[in-house]
Amino acid sequence: MTSRILIVGATGRLGRQFTRVLSTDLHEVRALIRAEPSSAERDEVLEQLEASGVQLVEGSLEDEQSLERACEGVTEIVSCVDHRPDHLLQQAALARAAGKAGSVRRLIPSQFGIDSRLYGEARVDHGDAKRAVQKELANSGIPITYIHTNGLAAEWVGSLGQLGLREPPQGQVEVYGEGDVRFSTVAVEDVARFGARALFDPAAAGRHLLIAPPDNLLTQVELIEAWEKKSGTSLERQTISREALDERIARLAADPASRPALAMAQLVRAAWLDGLGDGRRLPDVLDAVEAYPDIEYVRAIDYLDRYR
Ligand SMILES: NC(=O)c1ccc[n+]([C@@H]2O[C@H](COP(=O)([O-])OP(=O)(O)OC[C@H]3O[C@@H](n4cnc5c(N)ncnc54)[C@H](OP(=O)(O)O)[C@@H]3O)[C@@H](O)[C@H]2O)c1
């Protein structure tokens, strides 16, 4: 064994993929698991994790002692906790526990979206938490690698850009503005493959990494047209202007129960109107596709075949 890796969020969408990619003969993988009420689906995921040799350690980000126990002897950490602002901020406790362990060489915290440093304040509510936790992690003394992915394909390609849909719409599709702003997407399994490489790459220590495959940089209209061609269907475009989307966001912001829908509407504005995921990079950001050219990835156009 060369590494002992701790995964936080191993039962989630991204965490499951990281756990799968990192569970090789070279590594020992440990997963921090909350003592949640059991459900058939979650129990099955836990069984699969155990069957693949993952060591399950009970604990949560709220329980700092459990984090210290989970970090003992660990060399690398990947956190895939969900986008709730309080959960994202609790990653500071994880970094403190990692520092106490004294053995941790790298931490990838949960980011996995548009680089939150590109947003203004209060443009995307969990974006503020992703940016705020970076300041806390900077003081931990652990080399951090931030991974930015722009859109995950299951959310953005499968919905033809109408975030919140689980598959391509039938009949009508919302088109934001002119539908001509480019946005990059990446399949979740590819995020884990690029991320796993970065976890052990000395050049990625203390750096930000953007996974934005150039072939996957498409406008919303290109995505819709590609689907229409593949499926032999035709969708009615329902144009949503910037003003209409801003009004929708203001309405959702007034109702705390609408938080998930608010975050989605804010992300749609950031992607399809503000163009913050169009491949732009701050000067300190490494390009993952350039850095690891041997890693193959799913093309967004081919990803659409999963819905036929
Ligand atoms: N760019 C995009 O399009 C996009 C799309 C989706 C997600 N993301 C980002 O990807 C990241 C991961 O999201 P996801 O969708 O993979 O999350 P997810 O499927 O909701 O999974 C979240 C995981 O975190 C665990 N967890 C939650 N709270 C915890 C706590 N307090 N202590 C310990 N573990 C906790 C959950 O465990 P339980 O089993 O106990 O619930 C679960 O394993 C987030 O940063 C999110 O913003 C980006």
Image (cartoon, rainbow, N blue to C red):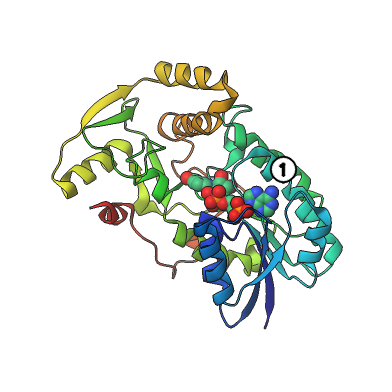
Give the residue at x 60% y 25%: 256
* Number of numbered discs overlaid on the protein picture: 1
Q: Is residue 30 above or below residue 67?
A: below
Along the line of sight, the residue nearer the viewer: 103 or 307: 307
Quick one: 197 or 62, which is closer to the camera? 62
Q: Is residue 301 left or right of residue 265?
A: left
Q: Residue at x 32, y 31 (%)?
A: 179
Residue 4, by quadrant, is bottom right
Which residue occupies 45% across, 66% down?
A: 293
Q: Position of residue 105 (x, y in %)?
A: 74, 67
Residue sticking out furthest to the left: 232
Q: Secondary structure at mark 1?
A: helix
In the foreground, 220 or 72: 72
Estimate the x, y position of residue 298 in percent, counting from the top left: 36, 60
Quadrant showing the N terminus: bottom right
Residue 190 in the image, given as x and y percentages of width and height: 45, 61
Question: As drawn, is 156 to the left or to the right of 113?
Answer: left
Q: Position of residue 189 (x, y in %)?
A: 45, 61
Asked whether the viewer can see residue 150, the reply is no
- The answer to whether residue 291 is above or below residue 167 is below
Q: Which residue is pictured at 65% across the width and 41% down the height?
A: 130
What kind of residue is marked 1?
A: Leu
